[in-house]
Amino acid sequence: MTKILKPYSRLPYSHALNFKELSLLALALLISDSVLTTMSVSESLSPCISDIETVIPTTPLVSFFERLQETALNTFGETNFDPKLYVDLSLKFDLPTTEDAFVKLPKSANGSLSAEDLKGFIEKYFESAGNDMVYCEPVDFVPEPEGFLPKVKNPEVRAWALEVHALWKNLSRKVSDQVQKRPELHSVLPLPEPVMIPGSRFREIYYWDSYWVIRGLLASKMYETAKGIVTNLIYFIEEYGYVLNGGRAYYTNRSQPPLLSAMIYEIYNKTGDMQLVKKSLPALLKEYCFWNSDIHKVIIQDSQSCNHTLNRYYAMWNKPRPEATTKDKKFASKISNVSEKQQFYRELASAAESGWDFSSRWMRNPSDFTTLATTTILPVDLNTFILKMELDIAFFAKVTGDNSTATSFIEASQSRLNAIKSVFWNEEVGQWLDYWLNDSTCKGCQTWEACNQKQSVFASNFIPLWVESFYSDTSLVDKVMKSFQGSGLLCAYGIATSLMNSGEQWDFPNGWAPLQHMIVEGLARSGSKEARSVAEDIAMRWIRTNYVAYKKTGKMHEKYNVEKCGEFGGGGKYVPQTGFGWSNGVVLAFLEEFGWPQDQMIDC
Ligand SMILES: OC[C@H]1O[C@H](O[C@H]2O[C@H](CO)[C@@H](O)[C@H](O)[C@H]2O)[C@H](O)[C@@H](O)[C@@H]1O
């Protein structure tokens, strides 16, 4: 049965207050030695989520925008229609006045509006999408930072890298003062610091994108901007109990791949900023609690009767995603049963929480989109990110002198390491495979069965390599690298997301910057010479295609076609976007790590 959260009365949009309260209880337990001596960290978190609610209510503004979106589709038609545009508008007048004018618009006998009337209404009553996030010059931007990419010797590549670096100015925004004054007129959420947006239709901050944005900002020596982004994400945790998918009211029902601790780790490594670590730690503990809530947590018993706790994506939502209501309703139209429809909507939103929206990875039958089953899967990458979070929290606790939290989180990371080995690792193929649950209700514990490991090749099967616990094991790296090289994923211009051309954007032949980066970084850091040279080779393929596409189109793209040099990616449910935060970040991070020799051509 669906549980509905009560709206947070202080604010115009709803918050997961119950979740916050429960998180605080968990934190109290976390810092209590007596509890930690008898329980593991994740067991001690259980009380905080025993009554977790599973649907976050929407706001009247977002509901109205959804109605407008549906009317716009019926009036303007499908050509070039982007549903997100309508939930990103801002009201010029209050909601009752706007709704009143909307219902009074003249309609024909069949109830339709004229395109001219609707256009006129939108112009009169709304600010354009994006006006709520205003351009702001990053405080630490200089055209050529001192010590910028010292290993890039080739003048052509250097000139391009400086252009990519300059793109931070295009992507830098702050929430407009209008939003701070009248938040009820806007879907964008107030934030304390400037942000970097991914670009184009993505006009707000995104959670996991920010990790690669920050990696690029660190290469650009823009430490203050990087810290500001982290401050915003911490603010989300303080306000909602977790980091939202993105900075809009319609993203409050889910998170995204949890990489906040990894962002702080990288910033601390470059700047040694202990204040940042101290201020982050309580927020990270809360976030850890969120990801270990009952909805996200599953217990698997292995063949030796040993219990392992692992996590899944699970959005707190069972309706169409507001930014894509018209599309989601269409996808769901062939499902007549109400609870099956709700479940499908939850699977859609959970796939969005995974960052892989959408992919054959989450489908029982890749040719039938309604077979999405995200919540029935324990994903390798999510659990790798949570392992990294545990290691980072242990590290931050240690450097700030909180030894008991450090010890608890080291123990938690060891349990997860065992869980990842027992549940995901497949010795025969030399990869970590997603684990499919027998059902998604997750009542009690489920028994591990070999046949539940998904025998398909996805780039995520290699993501554990990104974490030191795995990349420091040389014989493991060697085995996984051989498996990777024979997997078919490595293409002429980067790593494909999967081997299946499903038409979804997180599938073949698309390559995504974050996936290139995590696999390359794991191989490069492993200490094996061979692995480093494989990493460098992949990075160079990726840099080449980004460069050629940039020269052809004048833009950086959100994804690329790894089979064709200089071609951006396609497929999926929206048109390919440019800008683009994480692609810029990864190019700069790769060039910082590997450089580019003077006499090496970059064209292909
Ligand atoms: O509008 C549809 C979906 O758009 C986002 O997902 C995609 O863009 C994000 C920003 O670059 C990226 O983080 C994500 O991996 C992409 O698939 C959004 O995050 C989704 O929630 C949204 O439904």
Image: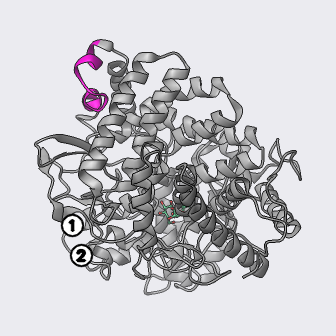
- Residue under the image location 56 percent in, 82 percent down: 563
In the shown orientation, is residue 209 left or right of residue 34? right
Indicate the quadrant where residue 181 lies.
top right
Q: Amino acid at mark 2?
A: Ile
Please, is residue 111 above or below residue 173 in the view? below
Q: Say what secondary structure mark 2 lies in.
A: loop
Can you give x and y, in whole percent of width and height, for residue 317 in the image? Answer: 34, 54
In the shown orientation, is residue 290 left or right of residue 534? left
- Residue under the image location 51 percent in, 59 percent down: 519
Count the numbered circles shown: 2
Q: Nearer the viewer, residue 32 or 271?
A: 271
Please, is residue 25 above or below residue 576 in the view? above
- Residue under the image location 69 percent in, 68 percent down: 543
Label pair 2/1, CB-CB below 8 angstroms: yes
Q: Quadrant of the C terminus?
A: bottom right
Can you give x and y, in whole percent of width and height, for residue 171 in the image? Answer: 73, 57
Say if disc 1 is inside 8 Å of ligand 1. Answer: no
Mark positioned earlier in the residue sequence (2 or 1): 2
In the shown orientation, is residue 289 left or right of residue 256? left
Estimate how packed mark 1 is, as few (under 14), some (14 to 19) or many (20 or more) residues with alpha carbons within 10 Å: some
- Find the magenta span and give its range: 34-48
Q: CA distance from mark 2 to mark 1?
A: 7 Å
Can you give x and y, in whole percent of width and height, for residue 244 in the image? Answer: 49, 47
Q: Amino acid at mark 1?
A: Glu
Say if disc 2 is inside 8 Å of ligand 1. Answer: no
Judge whether residue 192 can be spotted in this image: no
Residue 36 colored in magenta in the image: yes
- Magenta segment, principal secondary structure? helix
Residue 335 shows which numbered tag?
A: 2
Can you give x and y, in whole percent of width and height, for residue 457 in the image? Answer: 36, 71
Which residue position holds label 1?
340
